[in-house]
Image: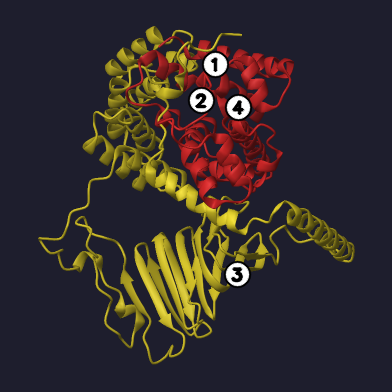
Chain colours: A yellow, B red
Amino acid sequence: MSKPASSPLSKHVHVDVSSARVARVWSGVSEKLERAPSGRRRWLYRGALATALSAVAVVGALKLTNRPQALSAWGKAKLETAGDAMAVGLDDGSRLELAARTLLHVVGNEPQSMALDLDHGRVDCDITPRPGRHFSVAAAGVVVRVKGTKFGVELAPARDRVNVDVERGLVEVTWQDGAQHRDLAAGEHWSIDLRHPEATAPRAEATAKDTDGAKAAAPAEASAEPSAAVDDPAKSPPAAPHAPREAPPGARELLDLGNAARRAGDAAGAARAYEELLTLHPTDGRAGLAAFELGRLKMDRLGDVPGAIQALQKAVMMAPGAGFREDAMARLVDAYARAGALERCRSARSAYLSSYPGGVHASAVSRQCQGR
Amino acid sequence: MVTEPRSTTRSGAGPTDAALVIAARARELWAQEALYQRYARMVLALSQRILAGRDDADDLAQDAFIYAFTRLDTLQNPQAFHAWLRSIVVRTASKRLRRQRLLTRLGLRRSEPIEPDTMISPEAPVDIAVELRHVYSLVEKLPPEEHVALVLRRVEGMELLEIAEEMKLSLATVKRRLASAEARLGRATTRRGQV
């Protein structure tokens, strides 16, 4: 077993211990400490909890034995938050984030559909696309149907207004028992006054910000036809020249953004984030990784082989000591082969094999660049 | 290496850990906050390094402090708060990793791949960056206890006895887990070739 390094590597690990982060964690700690029971009361609570769990187990066992087929774990579940928000991952990779003081019922969970009913509060949904599966959230008669997207639904505490925000993808909103409906695209916000759903046209507005950080669109004017009330962000008035400019995003932020988009299946969005990182922060330590990820996306997802070659060349040059360099060099050989650039392919193949003679891709790389 | 717990604040004029622990046991919020402020950065940094940059390091730090503050009455030597808190972070991290693996296996949680390059400081020398990359590329494939032991050994630079104390394991168990992790690390390093 090797000895630990004389100087720990820990000081070379990038960690964020900013004052803002320290304060944020403390606010969570202090809030929970205020609610935490003292030592004696904790035992009382544990006893009560054990009794309650036993009762639930007995009732559950009785119900299951009386049913021919048990539903999935999520069937008819009730998700409720008190003072804290809660995130729930579903078995298909989708994710629900319940804001504090929210009650959400799972009213249906079948292989082809999942239906949620928002009793109060707010739920943000990041839905993994699955062909043939429908996902919907209802709130006081307003139903939001989804086809692979990220969106939020909020029912105001007085139950007099429903707000919908779409961050990615497309949703269909229906209300008045399906008599009215409209589609909302990414960046749009929509709300309805439930006290006067007919008299007041539901409002939809773009929520995306323009590059100067000003709101891209003002709320649309009321209209008898809800679909006419959507503002087109492209037609929004330009921001005032004196509007304060936002600081450009940092390399870490852009890399996180790109990685999140990539994991969510948004290849184009991820590629934009990585490209922006390479443009704004070409000398940052993360630029090599961004170039590699960009190359992989362009090659595997976006069908842009010349773009992939350019990005992979950058990755190899920018990060000579990186762990992903071997993969980048192997992919570069493959990309040249796909582009039919056989001379460059052979040259890249020699470079890979001389750097990694026993590498994991050596046998596949050796077979590349065949032909005349 | 693990630094020795400070008996006083840096100025030498502040309350000792022992004094703060005694006040915090009486649920004095100011004492809890003083202990938090003294050790928050250590706990956050250790959490991030053990969880390999996953975005739940804040949750781990929060859980560790809440656990510590609600069980201060079990701390026999109030002056040893620092080492005790580190041990709580390490064991809470192991539990969290075990739970995450289980949820992932049951399909209730999406696996979050580790991105080693986001964790390495841009100023890190090349040889250190390579070693860190090898360690963090491997840990997500290791069982949680081996993951934690390897990070404590390779990244934190701790001695075997210190690791055993923090993980509340026997020295033999730590040696066994580290031997297994180090063997896999050696194989992964050889496969990748010398860069």
Q: Residue at x 50, y 77 (%)?
A: A157
Kind of residue sitting beneath label 4: Val
Q: Are marks 2 and 1 in contact (CB under 8 Å)?
A: yes
Choose between B8 and B45: the one closer to the eye: B8
Kind of residue sitting beneath label 3: Leu
Q: Which residue is mark 2?
A: B137
Sequence-wise, the earlier of marks 2 and 1 is 2
Q: Residue at x 72, y 51 (%)?
A: A39
Gap in angstroms between the C-alphas marked 3 and 4: 37 Å
Tag 4 secondary structure? helix
Residue A254, image quadrant = top left
Tag 3 secondary structure? strand
Kind of residue sitting beneath label 1: Ala
Instruction: Give the mark count.
Output: 4
State the mark number for residue B148.
Answer: 4
Gap in angstroms between the C-alphas marked 2 and 1: 9 Å
Q: Nearer the viewer, mark 2 or mark 4?
A: 4
Q: Which residue is mark 1?
A: B188
Q: Which residue is mark 3?
A: A103
Kind of residue sitting beneath label 2: Ser
Sequence-wise, the earlier of marks 4 and 1 is 4
- Quadrant location, the C terminus of chain B: top left
**Chain identity of mark 4:** B
Q: Are labels 3 and 2 on one chain?
A: no
**Chain identity of mark 3:** A
Let me know if residue A224 appears in the view: yes
Tag 2 secondary structure? helix
Gap in angstroms between the C-alphas marked 4 and 1: 18 Å
Q: Are labels 2 and 1 on one chain?
A: yes
Choose between B79 and A4: the one closer to the eye: B79
Q: Are labels 4 and 1 on one chain?
A: yes
